[in-house]
Image (cartoon, coloured by chain):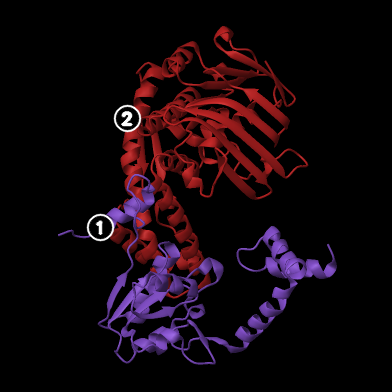
Chain colours: A purple, B red
Amino acid sequence: MTPAFDAVIDELKRLPGLGRRSAERIALHLLVEKRSQLKSLQESLSAAARTLNACPICGNLAEEGGPCPICLDPTRDASQICIVEQISDLTAVERSAAWRGRYHVLNGKLSPMKGIGPAELNLASLAKRLQDGSISEIVLALPNDIEGQATCHYIQEEIVGTQSISLSRIGFGLPSGGGVTYADSITLRSAIESRRNYS
Amino acid sequence: MEFRHLRLQNFRNFDFLNLELQGTRHFLFGANAQGKSNCLEALSLVTAMRSFRVREWKPLARSGFSEWQLRCDIRSRKTGEHCLELHVNGSRKQIFLDGDLLPRLGQLLGRFPVVVLGSEDLQLLRGSPGERRRWLDLTFSLIDPCYFEALLAYGNGLAQRNRLLKNGASDREIESFEQAMSAPAALLVKTRTQRTAELRTMAEDVYARLVDGREQPSLTYRPDSALDDPAAILQKWRDTRKGDRALGSTRAGPHRDDLRIQVDNRAAREYGSDGQQRALVMALRFAQSQLWESVLNEVPVLLVDDVLGELDPQRREAFWSLCREDRQVIATGTEQPPQYEHWQIHKVDNGIISQ
């Protein structure tokens, strides 16, 4: 198109989940069709970039250099931590309203092939949280793949170690409301392996 | 299952191909390098998106093109009529089944079983253990989604462990990946042990028919680790870790397994005659077909690439006795087959097929 427009497309394409077509659509929307939205988007992005930070306790999104709203919330059980891979996982668990404890966001999972080792994960602050003995339960809500499992094992052995903390992993099975007939074999196997007593 | 129609665009030496495949007996004949095997290669992709001739996909595109397409109309015994399309552009592949994009290869496995009997099959016997492992993996992945999933997980874990070994990572980090790999590794060993026993019975039966019961073949799965228990595999990796670090790779595990193939208790690879080896490979292919049929309740299509002409009368008779009338057979050869009245003949000439 034009050099300036192409530069915008190139920048947008670098964002996760955006291909060339989506990038073009967004660029045309902001620069041609709804130009009025451009200014408010610019302002909100600038403001967020100025004020947002990673929560020094759990790694969630926070503002003005302080802890995140969940870590500040006195109604949340501070002795329980749910460990997630990324912030979007935290928001998914929050939407479920099933967890009333706090969180810890790792910002990734172990993956030597991608150059991600323990030093690249938010593990040091997790170890620090466990030091004073106030944590009694940890739930690992990490993906059910090799990297997720390896990360769980690393946390169990290296971070939790011999401390008396209840450690569990979320179950993997049928989606709620899903029938057995239409579930794929892998999900069914996982569901059967993680079955529990019914009495 | 049965192929009904094949369309190709910019595949190998085909500019455009539109081939009707109604009926169960098709013979493609023509001189060498005209496109007969290319046609079978395209048909074989529907099983697992794997070529029986090359590992890389680049050679599948017509010279000078990076984009090619395949479209197959297929009739399944279980699920009726289907249209499978493959769109390839460079390294990007998209599979469509009845117009819907299939995001995962695993969703295709087990739907359209095709067995290939080819002139390069002897590599299964004479080649490296890796050739036999790949054959076992394809055979079992098609009928067991959990096996396929374990294979992917183990392959990923192995690559990660090897990278850690090369990088001089801590024992704790390496052990974390060993823990994660151990369950898929055990599942692979267990499934291979059980399923190879089934294959063995089937292969022995086919071989007896091919050679008139004079010789006794045997098929034995040889796990490198001989372990189908995650704890035992973990201990093995722990024991070998120091040496693995020095080499930068994992020396023990299901990725080192082999399939031992013997005739009368002697290794067929070293002691088998050319005829014995060809009969054995054919027995393995038919055993694969029988195993798939028994689990999937679908008769696999048989693609026979330039093999029928090499069979002596006894083996040819045995071959046909193994092909029921409802099994679709698509064969190639440089000359018209003697019993050509049973075949629908297609002439292949420089990328053009005519009846």
Q: Is residue B28 above or below residue A18?
A: above
- Compared across the picture, whether B237 is left or right of B111 comes to left
Q: Name the residue under label 2.
A: B201
Q: Pointer 1: residues within 10 angstroms few (<14), some, or many (20+)?
A: few
| Residue A90 lies in quadrant | bottom left
Q: Are marks 2 and 1 on the same chain?
A: no
Residue at the image point whose x is 34% and y is 55% from the top: A177
Q: Name the residue under label 1.
A: A195
Residue at the image point whose x is 46% and y is 64% from the top: B161
Q: Is mark 2 on a helix, strand or loop?
A: helix
Residue at the image point whose x is 65% and y is 44% from the top: B88
Quadrant into which the C terminus of chain A falls: bottom left
- Decide which of B119, B140 is in the foreground and name it: B140
Of all chains, the one bearing label 2 is B
Q: Pointer 2: residues within 10 angstroms few (<14), some, or many (20+)?
A: some
Residue B277's x, y, as percent?
47, 27
- Compared across the picture, whether B140 is left or right of A8 comes to left
Q: What element carries label 1?
A: loop
Q: Is residue B129 above or below residue B337?
A: below
